[in-house]
Image (cartoon, helix red, strand yellow):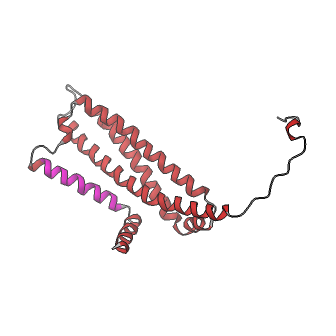
Amino acid sequence: MKARLVAAKDYWIDHLWLDILLSCFVVGVHVMLTISASGYDFMSYASRDERRALYSSTAVVVSLLGAFSGVAIAQASSGKGERVTTLKKHGAKSLANNWRSIYLSAIFAAAMALTCLAVDLEGGGIAAWLPIFARWIFEYSLVLCGVKFLRLISIFHPIIESAALDDAEKSDEKAPAVELHAKWGKLPKTG
C-alpha cells in the first residue's frame, strides 16, 4: 500500500497538469452541489464587505505561498552534500518546473483575488453576473493554490531531509581550532 502511495505521489509530482484537473474537479463538484441543492454556496452568504475582506486577505496569503517557494529554492541551492547534489543533478528540470508552477499559481491566485476585489462592487456599471462569476474564479484559484501548497510540501520535505542528513554527516568531522593571538582583544580594529 505504501509503495502505491509513493508511486501515486511521484506520478503527481511529474505531471503538473493534474493540479489543474484536480482543481477543476473540486470546483465542478461544488458548482453541481450549488445548482442541485441550496446551502452549498458559502460565498453567497457573505456580505459584499466580507467577500472583499476575504479577497484582499487571500491576495496576501497566496503571495506568502510564492515567497515560501523561494525559501525552498534557496534551501535546495545552498545544499552542498552528496544527496542534495544528486537531487539537483538528476531532478533539476522537474524541480524547476514544479517551483515555477507553484510560484505562478500564487501570482495567478493573487491576481484573481484582486480582480474579484475590483469587480465585486455595489451599484451599476457592472453586469450583475460578473461578481458571481468572479466568486467561482476566486474559488478555483484558491483550490489551485491549495493543491500547489501540497505540491510544495511534497517537494520541500525531501530537500530538507536530504540537506539535514548531509549536514549531520559533515558535523561528525571536527574542524581545526582557531589560534588566537595573546592580545587578540587589544588589537586595533580595522575598517
Measuring from the top left, give residue 49's x and y in whole percent: 26, 28
Residue 175 lies, with reference to residue 108, above or below; the image says below
Q: Quadrant of the N terminus?
A: bottom left
Q: Nearer the viewer, residue 39 or 132?
A: 39
Q: Is 29 included in the stretch rendered in magenta?
A: yes
User: Which residue is drawn at the image coordinates 58% and 64% (left, top)?
Assistant: 165
Quarter of the C terminus within the rendering: top right
- Name the side, left or right, on which 11 lies relative to 174: left
Residue lying furthest front? 182
Residue located 36% across and 45% down the image:
109
Question: Which residue lies at the image location 43% right of the left edge and 56% below the top edge?
Answer: 153
The residue at the point 30 percent across, 35 percent down is 54
Most extreme residue toward the top is 123
Instruction: Answer above or below: position of 115 versus 96.
Output: above
**Of 12 and 96, which appears nearest the observer?**
12
- The spot of residue 116 in percent (x, y) is 29, 37
Using the image, determine if residue 30 lies above or below residue 54.
below
Magenta span: 17-34
> On the rendered structure, is 30 left or right of 20?
left
Left or right side of 4 for 30: left
Q: Position of residue 126 (x, y in %)?
A: 22, 31
Q: Which quadrant would residue 167 be assigned to in this image?
A: bottom right
Magenta part, dominant SS: helix
> Can you name the residue that lies furthest to the right here?
182
Judged left or right of residue 29, residue 173 is right
Q: Quadrant of residue 117?
A: top left
Q: What number of labels is visible? A: 0
In the rendered image, residue 78, in percent from the top left (x then y), is placed at 61, 56
